Amino acid sequence: MPHNNSTLKQQLLRWLLVPQLVFWLVGAALSYAVALHYANTIIDGNLLQIGRALSLVITSTPAGVQVALPATASNVLDGTQEGAIYYTIRDPAGHVLLSNIELPLPSAGISKSSSEPALYNANLNGNSIRIAMMKISPPGSNQPWLVFQTAQKADYRNNLSQQIILSIALPLAILMLATSFLVWWGIGTGLRPLAQLQALLAGRKAQDLSPIQLASAPAEVSQLADSLNQLLSTTEASIGRQRRFIADAAHQLRTPLAGLKSQTELAMRETSPEVLRERLSMVHTSATRSIHLVNQLLTLARSEPGSQTGLPKVHMDLTRMLRDITAESVPRALAAGVDLGCEIMVSEACIEGNSALLRELFINLVDNAIKYIPRNGCITVRLSEDDTFYRIAVEDDGPGIPDADKERVFERFYRREQTGNGCGLGMAIVREIAERHGGTVELKDAEPHGLIVLVSLPHGKGRDHDD
């Protein structure tokens, strides 16, 4: 898995602050455009208003056009002042009648038909200016109309736009800095429970599988802690099963191996062929019991939940398996003087399961029945089904099991009778395998006497109950 050196806090800050910076820049550009638009609109309106005002103070005499400006208006129209207004008054032919500076005409010239005001940009003495031009007939004028041009340097409106954008940008910048600080502080505060969780895990010893305790944390961190606690619990259970298996194996193998060692030592001292043969027969019996115990332990280890990353399963037919197991067990049943039969009540019973483990399950049931019922007894293997489960029953007419012991026989190494070659793992294996396939095992009394071991396996695909 590729490793990312950046922290979650750094990633969150990038995801939040970079878009915020982009939006701030876009907002500043839009604010500047809006400020420039309104500055142009205001100044253009002022130029038009000044042109109309000029038409009111102009009188036409035989000597020409005269302007009677108040003192305050003269200061505004003084071309030497900052932000001064330039004006030019022309007759319909375009001749200058009066001006404080001659303003250029638009490239299209003076339209004789249009009476609408015109606004345009021009260059005057190396300076960019904004000009408003209109045609107005002054009061008392003998002229049908005069052309009034008013203008102002573009620098003035640019300065005004800059003042407006600065008045907007400065609060925006302060707001952005404050927001960025709050985002940085909020992310740090929000990620603090994760840092606490990391510190708890980093300070733990490998043997410590106790649940993680967080005093207070958001729901997401609590859910993560709960998932980790579930993983720790599963790991602890798995380690516990391994330790129990090792302890059980060591305990159960110690006695037969010690007996095997004693028998071999005694056999090595014998000189009589008859006694030596007897000793070797006892060695063989002990070795056989040890092999059986080891095989049972290995089967139990394979059948335990969590013993494998995944239980290998195949599509299989229970009817064929039960018929084969019954047929294979007939010689052992005959040797024990037991009548073994099979009743299959369904034509096909297909499931998804581990054939080796299921085979071990049913062999254990049949072998236990053969082993623990008296001679001339009867054993019947039945297969039926209902809406949900396949029901496999192994019924015998032996002495049965008391109700007090029906649950204990599923405990590991529990033996009701100390005779025989059993090791007390058969029924524990049966239950483990059935549960691995989503099934159950229960013991019932047979009529008039005997025992029924009923295994229920679900239809369809068996579920791997590793959790």
Image: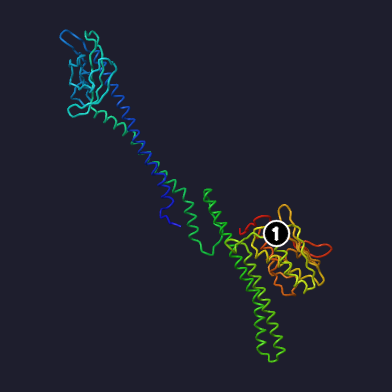
**Front residue (pair 466, 165):** 466
Q: Is residue 94 visible?
A: yes
Q: Position of residue 326 (x, y in %)?
A: 74, 67
Q: Farthest front residue?
A: 347
Q: Quadrant of residue 300?
A: bottom right
Q: Quadrant of the C terminus?
A: bottom right
Q: Quadrant of residue 141?
A: top left
According to the picture, the residue beneath numbered tag 1 turns out to be 440
Q: Farthest bottom residue?
A: 271
The residue at 38%/39% (across/down) is 23
**Front residue (pair 198, 299):** 299
Q: Quadrant of residue 256?
A: bottom right
Q: Position of residue 346 (x, y in %)?
A: 74, 57
Identify the element where label 1 is drawn: strand
Q: Is residue 169 left or right of residue 277?
A: left
Amino acid carrying label 1: it is Thr
Mark 1: give few (<14), some (14-19) or many (20+) Cα within 10 Å.
some
Q: Is residue 135 left or right of residue 448?
A: left
Query: Above or below — where is 391 with respect to 374?
Result: above
Q: Farthest right residue?
A: 448
Query: Above or below — where is 23 with respect to 445?
Result: above
The residue at 81%/69% (across/down) is 377
Q: Position of residue 107 (x, y in %)?
A: 22, 23
Q: Is residue 401 visible?
A: no
Q: Position of residue 33 (x, y in %)?
A: 33, 32
Query: Above or below — where is 422 with respect to 279?
Result: above
Q: Is residue 309 left or right of residue 178?
A: right
